[in-house]
Amino acid sequence: MICVLTGGTGGAKFVDGLRQVIPAEQITLIVNTGDDLLWWGLYVSPDIDSITYALSGLLSRERGWGVKGDTFLCLQAMKQLGEPIWFHTGDRDLAVHLLRSRLLAEGKTLSEATAIICQKLGVKARILPMSDSRVETRVDTPSGELSFEEYFVQRWYQDPVNSVRFAGASDAEPAPGVIDAITSADAVLIAPSNPITSIGPILSVPGIREALHSAKGKIAAVSPIVGNAPVAGPAGILMAAQGLSCSIAGVAKAYEDFLDLLVCDSRDARGAEGLRGKGLRVQCTQTIMSSSEDRSALARTVLSLACGGLLRDEAAAGGSISEASGEPAPTSSEQP
Amino acid sequence: MICVLTGGTGGAKFVDGLRQVIPAEQITLIVNTGDDLLWWGLYVSPDIDSITYALSGLLSRERGWGVKGDTFLCLQAMKQLGEPIWFHTGDRDLAVHLLRSRLLAEGKTLSEATAIICQKLGVKARILPMSDSRVETRVDTPSGELSFEEYFVQRWYQDPVNSVRFAGASDAEPAPGVIDAITSADAVLIAPSNPITSIGPILSVPGIREALHSAKGKIAAVSPIVGNAPVAGPAGILMAAQGLSCSIAGVAKAYEDFLDLLVCDSRDARGAEGLRGKGLRVQCTQTIMSSSEDRSALARTVLSLACGGLLRDEAAAGGSISEASGEPAPTSSEQP
């Protein structure tokens, strides 16, 4: 079993790669819910949706979120009604929000609603929200405190950021199965997601960080920072606000208390060497996922490094990775 | 001021005609809410929607319900999720259901939510739900008791009908403004709607029938029955179940305690004569509304008969109607 901590579009891409490399039944995903919002009266969980769509093959690869080929007629009608439309909800996408909202209104937990939606869409991987309690990422800016989606989507992350907090975290509990999935996994992978607002909320839930400390498998993170800049989004600004440098060193710092292996881009070979000098195992490879092949290649490399023997087709990957030698998979290259 | 009791597709067509003939500000509509349903967790009020769409110019004239040019992608996605899809909700249509549901969840009454939606869509007529309380039309069949939409839309009104009841009616109150609109109107028009399940629920609300008895204006109904058959839908079956013949006589009987004038189709001249013999004023005209012109012509005729001086362009109607002579408007013909 592989356990993946994930959120955001980078996480969805990585999971899209993973599902091509190992059987979905072997994957448990622990997903950020700090971005969840009430939108048009519906409960929307953007990261759970992206992962669900990635695993069911419905994800729009062009946009990186929402359903491929979706239309936005309800959104247009909402505009006519004077309702806010900054959060782009497609017509097909609405179906999942409607179903989830109804299930929650009927008393189901977010975990239960997620499991039902996954079953309906034929998703074989196990998707767990980080918590069934409401934990809300709040971004403090000079214009006031914003929800993450207000900061990120509505205001295009243009506001300076003073700090980030996770409202409700101290009273939250991990969702059922989360702790066991982490501690018992053969490997725990941290997707190339924003360390502050995608992985940070997960780590803010009491018990999850402790579970990572006692995980039996290796814990490997893929850096979302390449060449001292985020691949996408506001990770750099948010890391700075939380006192972390926008670099693979900053990523390593965010996870320093539990990280066994950092997978970073080949462009960060120099930084990687520096981190190795401090005792961290670091592997460089191509981490930019422009194509479907990029996604599966990165997933294969990370899996090979974090644990052997789980790949669907080890031979196709060019033979097993020698953990002892530290040799990467053929798609990666360890820089001096 | 004109007050219109309405529901169903016949009602929406009639209102579509009315808005072409008198200023919308002079119309108050009292609308059936017995068909209202929770659909995908949203509060849907089919008759209020149809009237709102008719008055805002959004109504699909092809379908007679929903928004013109609408698409059904959310519906398709709902099907993929295993949700029921027998009630066809379009993508644009969903916007109104979402907004109304959110307003109700925030504590607004159905009247208040309706007024807000009308204001957003530029509807100048006043649309009042018959009641802010839940009154549900229940159709008793050999297969059990069904909601109206289950009976009508899901099961295509194929079930034999034992009886119809209006659950919750005895505890309901007319919505604010309903009683005054009826008693003070210059004329009260009853749209060519199903007397049992479109007008019946309105009449079931305590106080509304009494208000009709004390209305200062004339009360005129347009028969939805033409040639002993309903123009559309299950009116005949439902009238029979309630002990009424499927004829203009049955319609007259349904409204006998308050009706001043029945407008029926020219094809029902014989039946009209019979009713006149019993002392009811009956006028025959073309009541089938195939075109936009048919709608406005019927509306003009009914208005002319029920009250003079309110028409936007009396001259265009070929001169005023002589109430004394009982002469119809040029588009109608009183049969011997």
Image (cartoon, coloured by chain):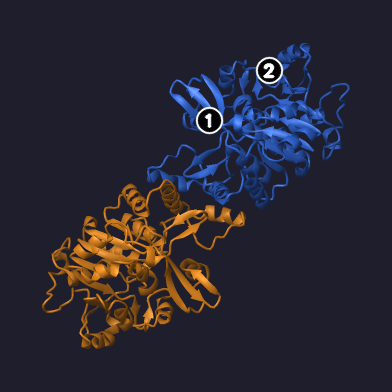
Chain colours: A orange, B blue
Residue under the image location 81 percent in, 25 percent down = B328
Write down the residue under mark 2: B253
Residue under the image location 60 percent in, 42 percent down = B49
Q: Is residue B203 above or below residue A183?
A: above
- The secondary element bearing badge 2 is classed as helix
Residue B31 x, y percent position in the rendering: 65, 36
For residue B304, say whether it is visible. yes
- The secondary element bearing badge 1 is classed as helix
Q: Pick whichever, B125 or B134, lies toward us.
A: B134
Residue B263 x, y percent position in the rendering: 74, 24
Q: Of the residues shown, which amino acid type is indicated by label 2? A: Lys
Image quadrant assignment for residue B17 = top right
How many numbered circles are shown? 2
Instruction: Return the mark for residue A108.
Output: none
Report the chain holding disc 2. Answer: B
Write down the residue under mark 1: B148
Q: Of the residues shown, which amino acid type is indicated by label 1? A: Phe
Q: Label 2 neighbourhood size at 10 Å, few (<14), some (14-19), many (20+)?
A: some
Image-based side of B150 in relation to B285, left or right: left
1 or 2: tag closer to the N-terminus: 1
Residue under the image location 63 percent in, 49 percent down = B117
Residue A87 x, y percent position in the rendering: 50, 62
Picture quarter with the C terminus of chain A: bottom left
